[in-house]
Amino acid sequence: MSRIAPQQLERFVERLFLDADVSPEVASVVSRVLVEGDLLGHHTHGVKLAQGYLRDLRSGHAKGQAASLQIVRQSPAAVLYDADYLLGPYCVEQALDFTARAARTFGIGVASIRRAHHIACLAAYLQRYTEQNLIPLVLTSDPAVASVAPHGGLDPVYTPNPLGIGIPTGDKPVLIDVSMSTITNGLVNKTHQAGGQLEHAALIDQDGQPTRDTATFFATPPGAILPLGSLEFGHKGFALGTLVEALTAGLGGFGRKDGVKQWGAAVTVLTFDPAFFGGVEELKAEMDHFVAACLASRPRAAQSPVRMPGHAGIARRAKAFEQGLELPEDVLAALRTAANEAGSDWPF
């Protein structure tokens, strides 16, 4: 691990995007969101992604100009965007800003984005809105990728289809970022590149046997990631994955049926304003009661007490600003390569 000041890292990543002729407003958001992913501990979805983003910009498979984000249809509370593969973090933040404004008037705002480029770590967006006493919800799928098998099937059909949601409390917010599959594509790729085995049999091979061996995922025919719940209860993860598919690619009207081959994302975001409903303080009081009850629950293992979703990441983030951000070697290697390919100096 190497420690880097988060602000310094953000400036470095932003400069890589600016040098690639990305709009300043886009480069600023993308670099901040990528670094935020690492601050929260999501290293597969942090600055490591810059290498792939920059390669897609150079090849024309991603756009970097803010003007690429076009409104297809809009009402005071809802909007449909077409992003033409503009870098995803900028698209998502624009959508969240719209829904936040709408929520303050109508209680809720909804935005759907079709043809966005990859959107990075969902948890990285949330605190910006929980700090405004709002509840942001982000759902995404990638129509170009098939890696998860439907429950009872062998062939990969859809993506892990994650959702992220931020919930304000009287103390630290609850930050949920979970996939509707047992594991993510990023973890499979990282484990495979390291030549290791998964901790659990989260995959099935070509014959439908559960396995920890990531080589089966890349075989011909390929293995697949199991839905959340694995073989025993995967019908639940499959149902939730179907819900995300409907509310992203389905709602946006563009997805797998269109034969998409380009790395990207179908996205829907919703933002709720508790003030319109039961009230902000009432929400916080209810969540504080719930959090306290969860944390007071007797631990199944004495060394592993209950912790709320996102709280470990929030603690990790605070430590990084005090002591510097620790980046794993594979992340540093990807950043060095990105800098080299961009003709930039490596400052760390």
Image: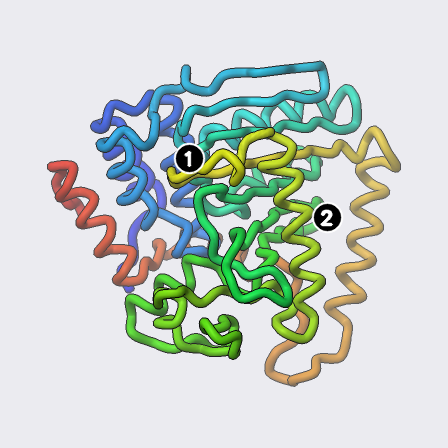
Q: What residue is drawn where x is 35% and y is 72%?
A: 215
Marks 2 & 1, CB-CB < 8 Å contact: no
Q: What residue is drawn where x is 75% and y is 79%?
A: 298
Distance in Å between CA atoms under marks 2 and 1: 32 Å
Identified by mark 1, the residue type is His
Total numbered circles: 2
The spot of residue 129 in percent (x, y) is 62, 35
Of residue 141 and residue 11, the one placed in the foreground of this image is 141
Secondary element under disc 2, as helix, strand or loop, is loop
The spot of residue 28 in percent (x, y) is 37, 29
- Position above or below: 127 against 300: above
The spot of residue 315 in percent (x, y) is 52, 58
The answer to which of marks 2 and 1 sits earlier in the sequence is 1
Identified by mark 2, the residue type is Thr
By what rule are the colours in the image chosen?
rainbow
Return the residue at label 1. Answer: 117
Quadrant of the image for the N terminus? bottom left
Q: What residue is drawn where x is 44% and y is 67%?
A: 223
Of residue 144 and residue 32, the one placed in the foreground of this image is 144
198 with respect to 248 (left or right): left
Q: Is residue 172 visible?
A: no
- Position above or below: 332 against 201: above
Return the residue at label 2. Answer: 169
The spot of residue 90 in percent (x, y) is 45, 29
Q: What residue is drawn where x is 42% and y is 35%?
A: 117
Of residue 159 and residue 138, the one placed in the foreground of this image is 159
Secondary element under disc 1, as helix, strand or loop, is loop
**Residue at far right of view:** 278
92 with respect to 75 (left or right): left
126 with respect to 276 (left or right): left
Q: Is residue 284 visible?
A: yes
1 with respect to 75 (left or right): left
